[in-house]
Amino acid sequence: MFQTHLENLNTTLESLKPLIIQLAQSANHFVTLEKSLENFTTKMEEGKKLVDECCEVGRFNLIKQSEYKDKILALDGSLRLLLRILKVQFEGHSAMLLHQIYGNSAAQNKNQIGVRCAVPPLPLVRPVGLDTPLDDLKMTLLGDCPESILVLTAPGGCGKTTLATMFCQDQEVKDKFKENIFFATVSNKVSYLIVQELCEHAGLKGVPALQNEENSFKWLQKFMTERGQNPLLLVLDDVQSGSESLLDWFNKFKMSSCKVLVTSRYHFQKFGRTYALETLEDKYAMALFRDSAFLPNTSSNIPDDLQEEIVRLCKRFPLSLKAIGDSLCNQPIQIWERKVLELSKGSILGADKKLLAYLKSCLDDLDKGMATVKNCFIDLGLFPEDRIIPVTALLDMWAELYEGTEDFLSIANLHELNTRNLARLVVVTRYASFYAFSLVPYSTLPIFYIHD
């Protein structure tokens, strides 16, 4: 065991050495990496010393071997911890460092540090069905409306990021904001990492390694003050439910010259106006599906009614249409017929892992202290597909399942699902008031309503 641990440590040190040397050569561009690299290099030197000492231990000196084995394992743990710290800091910097590591540094400019916050390129083929939403965004954010934050919300896979990219690449938008457009992907990143990326992309001098919210708040204020002197557009893409503190910060720095476009599966109603991106209209859904299912300039023997049935079963969600279309591209008609049979028997979730991942992330988020809401969502799968179901039935069911649950608590849970785009609340007035809900995304779950 001693010999195995020793060989593993030696191999680790030798394999890490070239990478650390390359990182050290690039670290002068990123002050925040220097300290971590220094600590890591020191640990590696300690490791080399330890290897040399271990090699002097006699084969039968079991006491010494046991003593050094513990030192080897402790050093291995320290290296792993330092690697994790280095990885977090590394991810906070731009893709420029990657180019430097792989020998492309000569073509890079030092001012490109913040490419992580650059606007992504548009798809080669212009997305269909987003022209009207694009006009709505331009009307809201290019006008003189008082809202400084607009939340673009929809279930995963509806095209929020694509629409935000189209907005940033629109000529009218570029004419107004010029080079003052920042596109930050939030996802699961901590707030101070987002601030770090924005400040580096803006070229602010002396940006330290931001590791706490207090320091990050000060630098965000500096960023907003300097860049907000001219029209400023910030896109915060894929904001999760746990990132409300970041939106709070931007909310405190409201400026007439600054517009913030947030894309999220959640509504975040307290941060300003919400724009709900709908699923595609039938004609656009069919166009997107055919773009994925058929090769350019080729004819097809797939009947129109078969194509229309698949589009209907895909619920007109862009991601599902593209995923299913790609899987059927250049396939014989029998494969298409089998796909219709599979989709009609169950959910489209089983058709593509990416679709499943989107819904899974929504449900995983409910694990954070919202077990009852998650159970309520799962309970809805008990009802028939595409049917209107009275919420009174749900209230009765939940009163039995979750003892002591009052009706107002159940209604609150439904509103929580609506806020997270796991259900859609529609108010219908016909002789009386109704709450009507339809579940999304990608689900075959029901519509249900309640008499007011």
Image (cartoon, grey):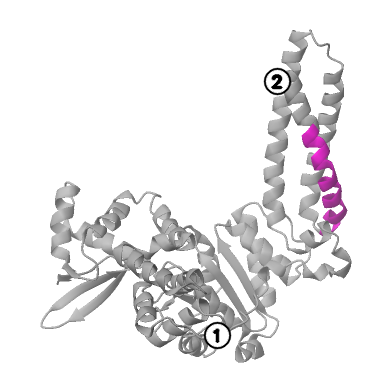
Going by the numbered disc 2, the residue's amino acid type is Asp
Q: Position of residue 91 (x, y in %)?
A: 68, 56
Q: Would you say residue 15 sits in the magenta stretch?
A: yes
Going by the numbered disc 1, the residue's amino acid type is Thr
* Left or right position of 430 against 73: left
Numbered disc 2: secondary structure: helix
* Left or right position of 424 against 7: left
> Magenta segment range?
11-29
Question: Residue at point 64% right, 66% down?
Answer: 220
* Left or right position of 74 against 340: right
Residue designated by label 1: 298
- Examine the rendered structure and indicate whether residue 155 appears above or below residue 208: below
Query: Of helix, strand and loop, which mostly describes the magenta segment?
Result: helix
Image quadrant assignment for residue 302:
bottom left
Image quadrant assignment for residue 54:
top right
Can residue 379 be seen here? The reply is yes
- Examine the rendered structure and indicate whether residue 91 appears above or below residue 266: above
Question: Residue at point 64% right, 63% down?
Answer: 195
Q: Position of residue 345 (x, y in %)?
A: 30, 63
Image quadrant assignment for residue 99:
bottom right
Residue designated by label 2: 70
